Image (tube, helix red, strand yellow):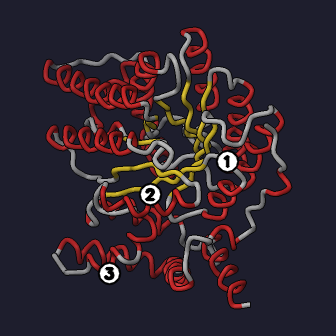
């Protein structure tokens, strides 16, 4: 059912911050004000890392500032309050176990079981928790995924018996998660990662889709449109899904590894996989939205974006094609603690919206928190958008 897009505005800060009290909003203001200083963020990152490594008792400070802004809690149960608060405003939660840095078989098995716990939690309230998510690097060693990717790209790879057994365990872990999601009718995102392991991740994704996406979309792959080849791969994946009669689940994002990707390509002498500029990324992201909507009969999408223009474009496309704002195969998603002007205004207008809500022990999720702080740091003296929005709402409330 078409909707009236004139009622959709991402400038309405009253709606954007309707869940926050004056005190909470002011705390957010102070946090983003701090993150607007590159030197302060740089110093703070080094200080916090050193303090935690030395056992300095600063966990409480972190938990009530940076952690509180961007994470739901240290455990699934601690996330319950965040889940309930978002649900009050018709915003779903994507539970994201964001522990990083531990790479051994015991940890891979533990991460698998933790992801399965998020699926069981979601099954209890699918409206409040419409998706779960995992990274394949949480279940597998990166060198192993590199070998698989090399082989898929036609390179000669010598496998040891130990490596073959390890990869079979990876396949079993991925299947265990996706089978649990299928049995509980909970949708699951498989996150995108670096290009030198992405082909291995893609292969696992499409095996799971062919197995579990026959009747409805359960498994979603992630398409990072800041790489110049990803739009083409999306179209190829769609053609395969159509031919084999299963749903293609597509989570569309711009991307998250640009500096690392360019540095590696330069050092190893291969073509830079990243788009030449932001405009090219935006163009492909929006083209992907158009393609998915035009092929809605066998593609389910989630637009993971903090870009207002792309969010509005998807709303327009849905309206043009007669797709109801709450159609189950169309979702918008943003990170918890960011872009509330997009999330809350879309939700108020009746669209399906979900927030990525990371959780895990404070020390273990610090790499994630440092990335969020870096993203919100001002560039060349420009105040971050998040800070401006909070500042605007504080001024409105004072009036």
Q: Can residue 379 be seen in the rendering of this structure?
A: no
Tell me: 389 left or right of 363: right
Mark 3–mark 2 CB contact (< 8 Å): no
Q: Can residue 275 be seen in the rendering of this structure?
A: yes
Q: Residue at x 16, y 20 (%)?
A: 160
Tell me: 282 left or right of 126: right
Q: Is residue 179 above or below residue 385?
A: above
State the image coordinates of residue 136 (x, y, percent, origin top left).
34, 36
Q: Quadrant of residue 330?
A: top right
Q: Residue at x 35, y 40 (%)?
A: 119
Report crowding for label 3: few under 14, some 14 to 19, many 20 or more residues within 10 A (C-alpha): few
Mark 2–mark 1 CB contact (< 8 Å): no
Tell me: 303 left or right of 99: right
As measured in the structure, the alpha-carbon distance from the residue carrying label 3 to the one carrying label 1 is 36 Å
Q: Residue at x 39, y 24 (%)?
A: 204
289 and 1: which is toward the camera:
1
Report crowding for label 2: few under 14, some 14 to 19, many 20 or more residues within 10 A (C-alpha): many
Question: Residue under circle 1?
Answer: 351
- Front position among marks 3 and 2: 2
State the image coordinates of residue 218 (x, y, percent, origin top left).
47, 29
- Of mark 2 and mark 1, the one earlier in the sequence is 2
Residue 83 - label = 2
As measured in the structure, the alpha-carbon distance from the residue carrying label 2 to the one carrying label 1 is 18 Å
Question: Residue under circle 3?
Answer: 61
- Quadrant including the N terminus: top right
């Amino acid at each position: 059912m078409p909707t009236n897009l004139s009622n959709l505005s991402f400038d309405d800060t009253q709606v954007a911050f309707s869940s926050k009290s004056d005190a909470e909003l002011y705390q957010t203001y102070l946090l983003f004000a701090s993150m607007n200083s590159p030197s302060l963020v740089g110093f703070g990152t080094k200080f916090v890392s050193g303090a935690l490594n030395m056992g300095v008792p600063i966990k409480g400070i972190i938990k009530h500032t940076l952690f509180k802004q961007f994470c739901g809690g240290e455990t699934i149960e601690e996330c319950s309050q965040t889940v309930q608060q978002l649900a009050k405003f018709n915003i779903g939660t994507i539970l994201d176990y964001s522990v990083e840095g531990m790479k051994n078989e015991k940890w891979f098995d533990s991460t698998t079981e933790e992801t399965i716990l998020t699926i069981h939690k979601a099954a209890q309230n699918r409206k409040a928790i419409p998706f779960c998510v995992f990274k394949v690097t949480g279940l597998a060693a990166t060198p192993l995924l590199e070998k698989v990717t090399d082989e898929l790209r036609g390179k000669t790879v010598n496998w040891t018996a130990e490596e073959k057994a390890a990869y079979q365990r990876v396949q079993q872990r991925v299947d265990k998660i996706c089978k649990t999601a299928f049995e509980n009718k909970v949708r699951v995102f498989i996150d995108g990662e670096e290009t030198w392991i992405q082909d291995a991740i893609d292969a696992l994704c499409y095996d799971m889709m062919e197995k579990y996406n026959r009747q409805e979309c359960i498994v979603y792959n992630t398409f990072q449109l800041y790489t110049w080849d990803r739009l083409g791969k999306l179209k190829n994946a769609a053609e395969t899904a159509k031919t084999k009669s299963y749903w293609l689940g597509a989570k569309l994002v711009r991307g998250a590894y640009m500096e690392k990707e360019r540095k590696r390509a330069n050092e190893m002498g291969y073509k830079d996989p990243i788009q030449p500029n932001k405009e090219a990324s935006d163009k492909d992201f929006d083209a992907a939205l158009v393609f998915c909507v035009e092929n809605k009969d066998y593609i389910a999408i989630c637009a993971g974006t903090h870009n207002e223009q792309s969010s509005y474009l998807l709303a327009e496309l849905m309206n043009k094609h007669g797709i109801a704002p709450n159609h189950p195969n169309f979702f918008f998603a943003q990170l918890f603690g960011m872009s509330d002007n997009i999330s809350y205004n879309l939700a108020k207008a009746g669209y399906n919206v979900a927030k990525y809500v990371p959780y895990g022990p404070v020390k273990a999720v610090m790499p994630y928190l440092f990335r969020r702080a870096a993203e919100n740091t001002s560039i060349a003296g420009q105040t971050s958008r998040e800070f401006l929005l909070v500042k605007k709402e504080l001024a409105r409330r004072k009036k």
